[in-house]
Image (cartoon, rainbow, N blue to C red):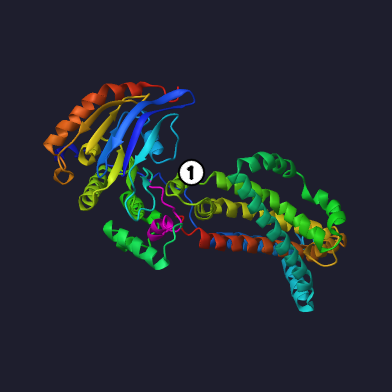
Amino acid sequence: MELRLSGVGHSYAGREVLRGVDLEVPEGQIVCIVGPSGCGKSTLLRMMGGLEVPAEGEVLQVGHSPEGCLNPLTFIFQDFALLPWRSVAGNVSLVLEDHPIARAERREMVADVLARTRLTEFVDALPRQLSGGMKQRVAIARALVVRPAVMLMDEPLSALDSQTRELLMDDLVNLWVRQPFTAVYVTHNLAEAVRLGHRIVVLSRRPGEVREVIQLDKPLAERGYGDAELEAQQKHLWDLMRAEAAAADAELVGG
Amino acid sequence: MRSLSVDKPEQKVAFRGGGFTFQSRRWVGFLVFIMLLLLAEWGTRSGVISPLTLPKPTDVFQIFVELYSSGLLFQHLIPSLLRLLVGAALGASLGIAVGLLIGLFSFVRAGLLPLVAAIFPIPKIALLPLFVIWFGIDEGSKYALIAFGTFTPTVVATFAAVDNVDRTLIRMGQSFGLSWVSIVRKIVLPGAMPGILAGLRISLAIAIILLVAAEMLGAEFGIGAYILQAGSLYDLERLFAGVVILSVLGVLVSAVIGAVERRLLDWRT
Protein backbone atom coordinates (compact mmCIF):
# COMPACT_ATOMS: atom_id res chain seq x y z
CA MET A 1 0.00 0.00 0.00
CA GLU A 2 1.15 3.52 -0.73
CA LEU A 3 0.31 6.83 0.85
CA ARG A 4 -0.23 9.94 -1.20
CA LEU A 5 -0.59 13.43 0.22
CA SER A 6 -1.69 16.28 -1.98
CA GLY A 7 -1.82 19.92 -1.01
CA VAL A 8 -2.00 19.24 2.70
CA GLY A 9 -2.22 22.38 4.80
CA HIS A 10 -3.19 22.96 8.40
CA SER A 11 -3.31 25.62 11.03
CA TYR A 12 -3.76 25.65 14.79
CA ALA A 13 -5.67 28.60 16.23
CA GLY A 14 -5.01 30.78 13.21
CA ARG A 15 -1.34 29.86 13.03
CA GLU A 16 -0.41 28.08 9.85
CA VAL A 17 1.75 25.02 10.52
CA LEU A 18 1.67 23.19 7.17
CA ARG A 19 1.26 24.56 3.68
CA GLY A 20 0.70 22.71 0.41
CA VAL A 21 2.56 19.50 1.23
CA ASP A 22 2.69 16.97 -1.61
CA LEU A 23 4.26 13.70 -0.69
CA GLU A 24 4.37 10.11 -1.82
CA VAL A 25 5.26 7.11 0.27
CA PRO A 26 6.07 4.24 -2.07
CA GLU A 27 5.53 0.66 -1.02
CA GLY A 28 8.41 -1.13 0.66
CA GLN A 29 10.39 2.02 1.35
CA ILE A 30 11.17 4.12 4.38
CA VAL A 31 10.49 7.81 3.92
CA CYS A 32 12.12 10.04 6.50
CA ILE A 33 10.69 13.45 7.23
CA VAL A 34 13.13 15.89 8.77
CA GLY A 35 12.70 19.52 9.65
CA PRO A 36 13.31 22.07 12.38
CA SER A 37 11.24 21.83 15.53
CA GLY A 38 7.68 23.06 15.21
CA CYS A 39 7.56 22.58 11.45
CA GLY A 40 4.52 20.36 11.69
CA LYS A 41 6.19 17.06 10.89
CA SER A 42 4.45 15.19 13.69
CA THR A 43 1.14 16.78 12.69
CA LEU A 44 1.73 15.51 9.17
CA LEU A 45 2.31 12.02 10.52
CA ARG A 46 -0.84 12.11 12.65
CA MET A 47 -2.80 13.06 9.55
CA MET A 48 -1.36 10.10 7.67
CA GLY A 49 -2.59 7.83 10.48
CA GLY A 50 -6.06 9.36 10.74
CA LEU A 51 -5.52 10.89 14.17
CA GLU A 52 -5.99 14.36 12.77
CA VAL A 53 -7.87 15.83 9.80
CA PRO A 54 -6.03 18.22 7.48
CA ALA A 55 -7.75 21.56 7.00
CA GLU A 56 -6.74 21.58 3.36
CA GLY A 57 -5.77 18.89 0.90
CA GLU A 58 -6.14 15.18 1.36
CA VAL A 59 -4.35 12.06 2.45
CA LEU A 60 -4.98 9.02 0.30
CA GLN A 61 -4.11 5.39 0.80
CA VAL A 62 -3.49 3.79 -2.57
CA GLY A 63 -3.77 0.08 -3.18
CA HIS A 64 -4.69 -2.84 -0.97
CA SER A 65 -3.37 -3.76 2.42
CA PRO A 66 -1.32 -6.95 2.55
CA GLU A 67 -3.15 -10.13 3.45
CA GLY A 68 -3.72 -10.67 7.16
CA CYS A 69 -3.25 -6.99 7.90
CA LEU A 70 -5.21 -6.00 11.02
CA ASN A 71 -4.36 -2.30 11.24
CA PRO A 72 -3.07 -0.82 7.97
CA LEU A 73 -1.73 2.43 9.45
CA THR A 74 0.18 1.68 12.62
CA PHE A 75 2.02 4.15 14.84
CA ILE A 76 5.17 3.87 16.85
CA PHE A 77 5.29 6.69 19.36
CA GLN A 78 8.19 8.64 20.76
CA ASP A 79 7.14 7.98 24.36
CA PHE A 80 6.42 4.27 23.67
CA ALA A 81 2.77 4.49 24.88
CA LEU A 82 2.90 1.14 26.68
CA LEU A 83 0.25 0.37 29.27
CA PRO A 84 2.19 0.29 32.55
CA TRP A 85 -0.24 -2.22 34.08
CA ARG A 86 0.28 -4.81 31.37
CA SER A 87 3.22 -7.12 30.88
CA VAL A 88 5.23 -7.14 27.65
CA ALA A 89 3.06 -9.93 26.26
CA GLY A 90 -0.08 -8.18 27.52
CA ASN A 91 0.85 -4.96 25.77
CA VAL A 92 1.37 -6.77 22.49
CA SER A 93 -1.76 -8.87 22.78
CA LEU A 94 -3.84 -5.75 23.64
CA VAL A 95 -3.99 -4.72 19.99
CA LEU A 96 -5.16 -8.20 18.91
CA GLU A 97 -7.91 -8.59 21.49
CA ASP A 98 -10.51 -6.65 19.50
CA HIS A 99 -10.05 -8.92 16.50
CA PRO A 100 -11.74 -12.27 16.15
CA ILE A 101 -8.65 -14.38 16.73
CA ALA A 102 -8.70 -17.59 18.74
CA ARG A 103 -6.87 -17.37 22.04
CA ALA A 104 -4.31 -19.99 21.07
CA GLU A 105 -3.56 -18.32 17.76
CA ARG A 106 -3.24 -14.94 19.45
CA ARG A 107 -0.74 -16.35 21.89
CA GLU A 108 1.20 -17.81 19.01
CA MET A 109 1.25 -14.48 17.16
CA VAL A 110 2.51 -12.69 20.27
CA ALA A 111 5.20 -15.29 20.88
CA ASP A 112 6.28 -15.11 17.26
CA VAL A 113 6.62 -11.32 17.16
CA LEU A 114 8.41 -11.25 20.51
CA ALA A 115 10.88 -13.79 19.17
CA ARG A 116 11.46 -11.64 16.08
CA THR A 117 12.19 -8.61 18.24
CA ARG A 118 14.28 -10.72 20.65
CA LEU A 119 12.04 -10.06 23.63
CA THR A 120 11.11 -13.65 24.44
CA GLU A 121 12.79 -13.69 27.83
CA PHE A 122 10.93 -10.55 28.91
CA VAL A 123 7.37 -11.75 28.19
CA ASP A 124 6.18 -11.30 31.75
CA ALA A 125 8.11 -8.14 32.62
CA LEU A 126 6.23 -4.92 33.34
CA PRO A 127 7.19 -1.75 31.44
CA ARG A 128 8.70 -0.14 34.54
CA GLN A 129 11.23 -2.97 34.71
CA LEU A 130 12.44 -2.30 31.16
CA SER A 131 14.99 0.17 29.86
CA GLY A 132 13.93 2.76 27.30
CA GLY A 133 15.36 0.75 24.45
CA MET A 134 13.51 -2.37 25.56
CA LYS A 135 10.27 -0.40 25.87
CA GLN A 136 10.58 0.83 22.31
CA ARG A 137 11.30 -2.71 21.14
CA VAL A 138 8.05 -3.77 22.78
CA ALA A 139 6.27 -0.94 20.97
CA ILE A 140 7.85 -2.09 17.70
CA ALA A 141 6.71 -5.65 18.41
CA ARG A 142 3.21 -4.35 19.11
CA ALA A 143 3.23 -2.53 15.78
CA LEU A 144 4.53 -5.56 13.86
CA VAL A 145 1.98 -7.97 15.30
CA VAL A 146 -0.92 -6.29 13.46
CA ARG A 147 0.99 -6.71 10.15
CA PRO A 148 0.74 -3.05 9.18
CA ALA A 149 0.71 -1.80 5.61
CA VAL A 150 2.49 1.40 6.61
CA MET A 151 4.34 2.06 9.84
CA LEU A 152 4.16 5.63 11.07
CA MET A 153 7.07 6.32 13.37
CA ASP A 154 7.03 9.55 15.34
CA GLU A 155 10.60 10.18 16.49
CA PRO A 156 10.77 6.63 17.80
CA LEU A 157 14.36 6.87 19.00
CA SER A 158 14.40 10.43 20.33
CA ALA A 159 13.75 9.44 23.93
CA LEU A 160 16.72 7.05 23.98
CA ASP A 161 20.39 7.59 24.66
CA SER A 162 22.71 7.57 21.67
CA GLN A 163 24.09 4.07 22.19
CA THR A 164 20.66 2.51 22.50
CA ARG A 165 19.66 4.48 19.44
CA GLU A 166 22.44 2.87 17.39
CA LEU A 167 21.38 -0.59 18.55
CA LEU A 168 17.75 0.01 17.72
CA MET A 169 18.63 1.44 14.31
CA ASP A 170 20.46 -1.81 13.57
CA ASP A 171 17.37 -3.69 14.74
CA LEU A 172 15.11 -1.69 12.45
CA VAL A 173 17.47 -2.20 9.50
CA ASN A 174 17.57 -5.95 10.18
CA LEU A 175 13.79 -6.12 10.38
CA TRP A 176 13.48 -4.25 7.09
CA VAL A 177 16.11 -6.37 5.33
CA ARG A 178 14.40 -9.57 6.41
CA GLN A 179 10.99 -8.33 5.36
CA PRO A 180 10.79 -4.90 3.70
CA PHE A 181 8.04 -2.73 5.17
CA THR A 182 6.65 0.64 4.22
CA ALA A 183 7.27 3.35 6.75
CA VAL A 184 7.17 7.06 7.38
CA TYR A 185 9.83 8.03 9.85
CA VAL A 186 9.66 11.47 11.42
CA THR A 187 12.83 12.62 13.12
CA HIS A 188 14.92 15.66 13.84
CA ASN A 189 18.03 13.50 13.94
CA LEU A 190 19.77 13.67 10.58
CA ALA A 191 21.97 10.65 11.33
CA GLU A 192 18.86 8.51 11.73
CA ALA A 193 17.43 9.90 8.52
CA VAL A 194 20.48 8.99 6.41
CA ARG A 195 20.75 5.55 8.02
CA LEU A 196 17.15 4.50 7.58
CA GLY A 197 15.67 6.58 4.78
CA HIS A 198 15.32 5.52 1.17
CA ARG A 199 13.96 8.96 0.66
CA ILE A 200 14.39 11.98 2.88
CA VAL A 201 11.88 14.80 2.83
CA VAL A 202 13.16 18.10 4.19
CA LEU A 203 10.50 20.44 5.54
CA SER A 204 10.99 24.15 6.00
CA ARG A 205 10.25 25.87 9.26
CA ARG A 206 6.68 26.85 10.07
CA PRO A 207 4.56 26.88 7.98
CA GLY A 208 6.09 23.58 6.89
CA GLU A 209 6.57 23.15 3.16
CA VAL A 210 8.57 20.53 1.31
CA ARG A 211 11.95 22.11 0.62
CA GLU A 212 13.69 19.18 -0.92
CA VAL A 213 13.35 15.46 -1.42
CA ILE A 214 16.56 13.46 -1.37
CA GLN A 215 16.81 9.96 -2.76
CA LEU A 216 19.37 7.65 -1.15
CA ASP A 217 20.11 4.62 -3.30
CA LYS A 218 22.60 2.81 -1.11
CA PRO A 219 20.92 -0.35 0.26
CA LEU A 220 20.05 -0.16 3.95
CA ALA A 221 22.09 -3.23 4.80
CA GLU A 222 25.26 -1.59 3.51
CA ARG A 223 24.88 1.59 5.50
CA GLY A 224 26.82 1.56 8.71
CA TYR A 225 27.92 3.70 11.60
CA GLY A 226 30.33 6.41 10.45
CA ASP A 227 29.83 5.78 6.72
CA ALA A 228 31.64 8.55 4.77
CA GLU A 229 29.03 8.72 2.02
CA LEU A 230 26.25 9.07 4.55
CA GLU A 231 28.19 11.70 6.45
CA ALA A 232 28.37 13.74 3.27
CA GLN A 233 24.61 13.41 2.81
CA GLN A 234 24.07 14.34 6.41
CA LYS A 235 26.22 17.43 5.97
CA HIS A 236 24.26 18.40 2.89
CA LEU A 237 21.03 18.04 4.88
CA TRP A 238 22.41 20.11 7.69
CA ASP A 239 23.46 22.86 5.28
CA LEU A 240 19.91 22.88 3.97
CA MET A 241 18.40 23.09 7.41
CA ARG A 242 20.86 25.16 9.36
CA ALA A 243 19.39 28.58 8.71
CA GLU A 244 15.83 27.31 9.13
CA ALA A 245 16.64 25.58 12.40
CA ALA A 246 18.32 28.69 13.75
CA ALA A 247 15.35 30.84 12.78
CA ALA A 248 12.90 28.34 14.27
CA ASP A 249 14.89 28.24 17.47
CA ALA A 250 14.80 32.03 17.80
CA GLU A 251 11.00 32.16 17.57
CA LEU A 252 8.93 32.75 20.65
CA VAL A 253 7.14 29.62 21.75
CA GLY A 254 3.44 30.00 21.05
CA GLY A 255 4.01 33.72 20.45
CA MET B 1 52.54 16.22 40.85
CA ARG B 2 52.52 14.39 44.16
CA SER B 3 54.23 17.24 45.90
CA LEU B 4 51.17 19.36 45.21
CA SER B 5 49.14 17.63 47.91
CA VAL B 6 51.90 17.74 50.48
CA ASP B 7 51.54 20.36 53.20
CA LYS B 8 48.02 21.24 52.14
CA PRO B 9 45.25 20.60 54.65
CA GLU B 10 43.17 17.51 53.96
CA GLN B 11 39.58 17.29 54.94
CA LYS B 12 36.99 14.67 54.33
CA VAL B 13 33.97 15.95 52.42
CA ALA B 14 31.18 16.06 54.96
CA PHE B 15 27.90 14.32 54.13
CA ARG B 16 25.03 16.76 53.92
CA GLY B 17 22.49 14.91 51.79
CA GLY B 18 20.50 13.28 54.58
CA GLY B 19 16.85 13.64 55.50
CA PHE B 20 13.83 14.62 53.40
CA THR B 21 13.38 11.08 52.17
CA PHE B 22 10.61 8.76 53.19
CA GLN B 23 11.51 5.55 54.96
CA SER B 24 9.16 2.88 56.15
CA ARG B 25 9.15 2.74 59.96
CA ARG B 26 6.01 0.88 60.95
CA TRP B 27 6.94 0.30 64.55
CA VAL B 28 7.13 4.03 65.33
CA GLY B 29 3.37 4.35 64.97
CA PHE B 30 2.77 1.55 67.46
CA LEU B 31 5.33 2.98 69.81
CA VAL B 32 3.68 6.43 69.87
CA PHE B 33 0.32 4.79 70.45
CA ILE B 34 1.57 2.65 73.33
CA MET B 35 3.44 5.55 74.89
CA LEU B 36 0.26 7.65 74.89
CA LEU B 37 -1.69 4.80 76.45
CA LEU B 38 0.95 4.30 79.12
CA LEU B 39 0.98 8.03 79.81
CA ALA B 40 -2.80 8.08 80.20
CA GLU B 41 -2.70 5.02 82.43
CA TRP B 42 -0.01 6.49 84.62
CA GLY B 43 -1.76 9.87 84.78
CA THR B 44 -5.15 8.48 85.77
CA ARG B 45 -3.67 6.08 88.30
CA SER B 46 -1.49 8.65 89.99
CA GLY B 47 -4.28 11.24 90.04
CA VAL B 48 -2.53 13.78 87.81
CA ILE B 49 -5.44 13.34 85.40
CA SER B 50 -8.79 13.32 87.17
CA PRO B 51 -11.16 10.44 86.31
CA LEU B 52 -13.62 13.04 84.98
CA THR B 53 -11.14 14.18 82.34
CA LEU B 54 -10.05 10.86 80.99
CA PRO B 55 -11.00 7.29 81.81
CA LYS B 56 -8.35 4.79 82.78
CA PRO B 57 -7.26 2.81 79.69
CA THR B 58 -7.50 -0.44 81.63
CA ASP B 59 -11.11 0.41 82.57
CA VAL B 60 -11.92 1.00 78.93
CA PHE B 61 -10.38 -2.36 78.15
CA GLN B 62 -12.50 -3.88 80.90
CA ILE B 63 -15.61 -2.46 79.23
CA PHE B 64 -14.54 -4.18 76.02
CA VAL B 65 -14.26 -7.51 77.76
CA GLU B 66 -17.74 -7.02 79.22
CA LEU B 67 -19.17 -5.96 75.88
CA TYR B 68 -17.73 -9.03 74.26
CA SER B 69 -18.79 -11.53 76.89
CA SER B 70 -22.34 -10.15 77.12
CA GLY B 71 -22.73 -10.37 73.34
CA LEU B 72 -23.61 -6.69 73.27
CA LEU B 73 -20.57 -5.91 71.14
CA PHE B 74 -21.89 -7.74 68.11
CA GLN B 75 -25.41 -6.55 68.75
CA HIS B 76 -24.10 -3.04 68.15
CA LEU B 77 -21.34 -3.80 65.67
CA ILE B 78 -23.22 -5.96 63.17
CA PRO B 79 -26.01 -3.49 62.30
CA SER B 80 -23.39 -0.75 62.04
CA LEU B 81 -21.19 -2.78 59.71
CA LEU B 82 -24.20 -3.68 57.59
CA ARG B 83 -25.21 -0.03 57.26
CA LEU B 84 -21.68 0.95 56.40
CA LEU B 85 -21.34 -1.82 53.85
CA VAL B 86 -24.64 -1.23 52.07
CA GLY B 87 -24.46 2.56 52.17
CA ALA B 88 -20.83 2.85 51.13
CA ALA B 89 -21.15 0.21 48.42
CA LEU B 90 -24.17 2.02 46.95
CA GLY B 91 -22.55 5.44 47.15
CA ALA B 92 -19.15 4.39 45.89
CA SER B 93 -20.38 2.34 42.94
CA LEU B 94 -22.82 5.05 41.86
CA GLY B 95 -20.09 7.64 42.39
CA ILE B 96 -17.59 5.76 40.25
CA ALA B 97 -20.19 5.28 37.51
CA VAL B 98 -21.23 8.94 37.45
CA GLY B 99 -17.59 10.05 37.74
CA LEU B 100 -16.69 7.94 34.70
CA LEU B 101 -19.58 9.41 32.72
CA ILE B 102 -18.51 12.93 33.65
CA GLY B 103 -14.94 12.11 32.71
CA LEU B 104 -15.85 10.54 29.37
CA PHE B 105 -18.68 12.65 27.97
CA SER B 106 -18.46 16.41 27.74
CA PHE B 107 -22.25 16.68 27.64
CA VAL B 108 -22.63 14.84 30.92
CA ARG B 109 -19.82 16.91 32.35
CA ALA B 110 -21.46 20.18 31.38
CA GLY B 111 -24.76 18.98 32.83
CA LEU B 112 -23.69 17.31 36.05
CA LEU B 113 -20.55 19.07 37.19
CA PRO B 114 -22.37 22.18 38.49
CA LEU B 115 -24.83 19.88 40.24
CA VAL B 116 -22.03 17.97 41.94
CA ALA B 117 -20.41 21.24 42.95
CA ALA B 118 -23.74 22.34 44.41
CA ILE B 119 -24.32 19.24 46.53
CA PHE B 120 -20.72 18.63 47.58
CA PRO B 121 -20.64 21.30 50.34
CA ILE B 122 -24.04 20.42 51.83
CA PRO B 123 -23.49 18.80 55.24
CA LYS B 124 -25.26 15.55 54.53
CA ILE B 125 -26.29 15.18 58.18
CA ALA B 126 -28.54 18.20 57.72
CA LEU B 127 -30.49 16.19 55.17
CA LEU B 128 -31.23 13.29 57.53
CA PRO B 129 -34.77 14.51 58.39
CA LEU B 130 -35.48 14.71 54.68
CA PHE B 131 -34.17 11.21 54.16
CA VAL B 132 -36.31 9.97 57.04
CA ILE B 133 -39.37 11.30 55.21
CA TRP B 134 -38.23 9.88 51.89
CA PHE B 135 -36.87 6.51 52.92
CA GLY B 136 -38.43 5.81 56.31
CA ILE B 137 -37.15 6.02 59.86
CA ASP B 138 -35.35 2.66 59.81
CA GLU B 139 -32.50 1.35 57.66
CA GLY B 140 -33.49 3.08 54.40
CA SER B 141 -32.68 6.59 55.55
CA LYS B 142 -29.35 5.47 57.02
CA TYR B 143 -28.30 3.74 53.82
CA ALA B 144 -29.32 6.82 51.87
CA LEU B 145 -27.38 9.19 54.10
CA ILE B 146 -24.18 7.13 53.95
CA ALA B 147 -24.58 6.52 50.21
CA PHE B 148 -25.14 10.20 49.53
CA GLY B 149 -22.16 11.18 51.65
CA THR B 150 -19.77 8.81 49.87
CA PHE B 151 -21.23 9.58 46.44
CA THR B 152 -20.01 13.15 45.94
CA PRO B 153 -16.33 12.75 46.93
CA THR B 154 -16.18 9.55 44.86
CA VAL B 155 -17.57 11.37 41.81
CA VAL B 156 -15.03 14.17 42.14
CA ALA B 157 -12.11 11.77 42.66
CA THR B 158 -13.18 9.56 39.77
CA PHE B 159 -13.61 12.20 37.12
CA ALA B 160 -10.38 13.90 38.16
CA ALA B 161 -8.66 10.52 37.84
CA VAL B 162 -10.17 9.99 34.38
CA ASP B 163 -8.95 13.44 33.35
CA ASN B 164 -5.47 12.44 34.46
CA VAL B 165 -5.26 9.30 32.35
CA ASP B 166 -2.37 9.65 29.94
CA ARG B 167 -3.87 10.93 26.66
CA THR B 168 -1.07 9.36 24.62
CA LEU B 169 -2.27 5.94 25.80
CA ILE B 170 -5.78 6.72 24.58
CA ARG B 171 -4.38 7.97 21.24
CA MET B 172 -2.42 4.74 21.03
CA GLY B 173 -5.60 2.74 21.56
CA GLN B 174 -7.37 4.70 18.85
CA SER B 175 -4.45 4.35 16.45
CA PHE B 176 -4.67 0.57 16.75
CA GLY B 177 -8.39 0.67 16.06
CA LEU B 178 -9.47 -0.46 19.54
CA SER B 179 -13.21 -0.18 20.18
CA TRP B 180 -14.56 2.50 22.49
CA VAL B 181 -15.49 -0.12 25.09
CA SER B 182 -12.00 -1.61 24.98
CA ILE B 183 -10.38 1.79 25.40
CA VAL B 184 -12.53 2.54 28.44
CA ARG B 185 -12.14 -0.90 29.98
CA LYS B 186 -8.48 -1.54 29.25
CA ILE B 187 -6.96 1.94 29.22
CA VAL B 188 -9.15 4.55 30.98
CA LEU B 189 -10.35 2.45 33.91
CA PRO B 190 -6.99 0.96 34.94
CA GLY B 191 -5.34 4.33 34.35
CA ALA B 192 -7.85 6.03 36.63
CA MET B 193 -7.67 3.32 39.30
CA PRO B 194 -4.98 4.96 41.47
CA GLY B 195 -7.03 8.15 41.72
CA ILE B 196 -10.27 6.28 42.32
CA LEU B 197 -8.77 4.28 45.18
CA ALA B 198 -7.24 7.38 46.72
CA GLY B 199 -10.68 8.98 46.58
CA LEU B 200 -12.25 5.92 48.18
CA ARG B 201 -10.00 6.31 51.19
CA ILE B 202 -11.58 9.69 51.84
CA SER B 203 -15.11 8.63 50.92
CA LEU B 204 -15.07 5.65 53.27
CA ALA B 205 -13.81 7.74 56.19
CA ILE B 206 -16.71 10.09 55.52
CA ALA B 207 -19.01 7.06 55.44
CA ILE B 208 -17.94 6.09 58.97
CA ILE B 209 -18.57 9.62 60.23
CA LEU B 210 -22.03 9.65 58.67
CA LEU B 211 -22.78 6.18 60.00
CA VAL B 212 -22.32 7.42 63.55
CA ALA B 213 -24.30 10.57 62.86
CA ALA B 214 -27.20 8.59 61.44
CA GLU B 215 -27.18 6.18 64.34
CA MET B 216 -27.14 9.00 66.87
CA LEU B 217 -30.30 10.44 65.37
CA GLY B 218 -32.43 7.38 65.60
CA ALA B 219 -31.25 3.86 66.15
CA GLU B 220 -31.63 1.36 68.92
CA PHE B 221 -28.47 -0.55 68.12
CA GLY B 222 -25.26 0.51 66.47
CA ILE B 223 -21.99 2.05 67.55
CA GLY B 224 -23.41 5.54 67.18
CA ALA B 225 -26.34 4.73 69.42
CA TYR B 226 -24.00 3.15 71.94
CA ILE B 227 -21.77 6.22 72.04
CA LEU B 228 -24.78 8.52 72.34
CA GLN B 229 -26.13 6.52 75.30
CA ALA B 230 -22.79 6.53 77.03
CA GLY B 231 -22.32 10.23 76.33
CA SER B 232 -25.64 11.30 77.75
CA LEU B 233 -24.82 9.40 80.95
CA TYR B 234 -21.29 10.86 81.02
CA ASP B 235 -20.05 7.31 81.13
CA LEU B 236 -16.60 8.11 79.78
CA GLU B 237 -15.30 4.52 79.84
CA ARG B 238 -18.09 3.36 77.55
CA LEU B 239 -17.84 6.47 75.42
CA PHE B 240 -14.15 5.77 74.85
CA ALA B 241 -14.83 2.12 74.14
CA GLY B 242 -17.18 3.22 71.35
CA VAL B 243 -14.69 5.70 69.99
CA VAL B 244 -11.99 3.03 69.95
CA ILE B 245 -14.27 0.77 67.91
CA LEU B 246 -14.70 3.57 65.37
CA SER B 247 -10.95 4.13 65.16
CA VAL B 248 -10.35 0.43 64.65
CA LEU B 249 -13.00 0.46 61.95
CA GLY B 250 -11.19 3.33 60.23
CA VAL B 251 -7.86 1.56 60.41
CA LEU B 252 -9.44 -1.62 59.05
CA VAL B 253 -11.06 0.18 56.12
CA SER B 254 -7.77 1.86 55.32
CA ALA B 255 -5.98 -1.50 55.52
CA VAL B 256 -8.51 -3.09 53.17
CA ILE B 257 -7.98 -0.32 50.61
CA GLY B 258 -4.24 -0.68 51.07
CA ALA B 259 -4.53 -4.38 50.27
CA VAL B 260 -6.68 -3.67 47.22
CA GLU B 261 -4.13 -1.08 46.05
CA ARG B 262 -1.29 -3.53 46.45
CA ARG B 263 -3.22 -6.04 44.37
CA LEU B 264 -4.54 -3.78 41.64
CA LEU B 265 -1.69 -1.29 41.44
CA ASP B 266 1.27 -3.63 41.66
CA TRP B 267 2.40 -2.23 38.30
CA ARG B 268 3.44 1.00 39.98
CA THR B 269 6.90 1.23 41.48
Q: Which residue, as the protein is rendered here, is positioned at the far left?
A: A228
Tell me the magenta residue range. A80-97
Residue drawn at point x = 50 percent, y = 52 percent: B179
| Image spot of residue B2 (x, y percent) | 15, 40
Q: Inspect the image, locate mark 1, and give the three-letter code of the amino acid beneath it.
A: Arg
Query: How busy is the neighbourhood of tag 1: few (under 14 within 10 Å), some, or many (20 plus)?
Result: few
Residue A205 shown in magenta: no
The residue wearing badge 1 is: B167
Name which residue lies at 22% across and 29% down.
Answer: A237
Q: At 20% across and 50% down in the image, what residue appears? A: A177
Q: Magenta span: helix, strand or loop, mainly? A: loop
As drawn, is A121 to the left or to the right of B253?
left
Quadrant showing the N terminus of chain A: top left
Residue A12, relative to residue A115: is it above or below?
A: above
Instruction: Check disc 1 and report its element: helix, strand or loop.
Output: helix
Q: Which percent across, then down, holds residue A245?
A: 30, 25
